[in-house]
Amino acid sequence: GKSIVGIYLEGCSPEEKKRRRRDGNTLLQLGVSPEMVLTELASLMPELQPIMVGRDDYKKSELQNLEQFLKEG
């Protein structure tokens, strides 16, 4: 299946990934939850929304992917 986090990071340079990680961690510090970030990413990619509807395991996996990305580096 498609990974929202993977698609979001696809083609990013290491510098861009570092910036996105920093921005994501800043959002977490401001009280934005990983689930809120994932929901926003999905809204930016409407083709993935049908994949997420009613698929709690998929959402859980994507949240883990997002949290792992934010912890890297």
Image (tube, rainbow, N blue to C red):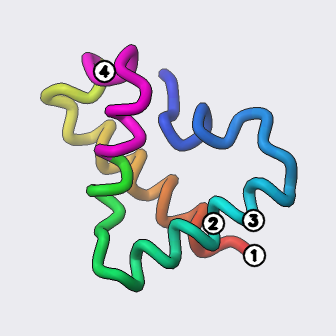
Neighbor class of circle 4 (other Cα within 10 Å; few <14, some 14-19, many 20+) is some
State the residue at coordinates (75%, 65%).
18
Q: Quadrant of the C terminus?
A: bottom right
Disc 2/disc 1 C-alpha distance (Å): 9 Å
Disc 1/disc 3 C-alpha distance (Å): 8 Å
Mark 4 or 2, closer to the camera: 2
Residue 58 position by quadrant = top left
Question: Residue 19: x and y, percent?
Answer: 71, 64
Q: Read off the residue under disc 2.
A: 21
First-in-chain label (1 vs 4): 4
Label ID, residue 51: 4
Neighbor class of circle 1 (other Cα within 10 Å; few <14, some 14-19, many 20+) is few
Q: Assign a secondary structure to mark 2.
A: helix
Q: Assign a secondary structure to mark 4.
A: helix
Badge 2 vs badge 3, beta-carbon distance below 8 Å: yes
Amino acid on which disc 3 is placed? Lys
Mark 4 or 3, closer to the camera: 3
Q: Considering only vertical position in the picture, is 28 above or below 17?
A: below
Badge 2 vs badge 1, beta-carbon distance below 8 Å: yes
Q: Residue furthest bottom?
A: 29
Question: Residue 65: x and y, percent?
Answer: 51, 53
State the residue at coordinates (35%, 63%).
34
State the residue at coordinates (64%, 59%).
20
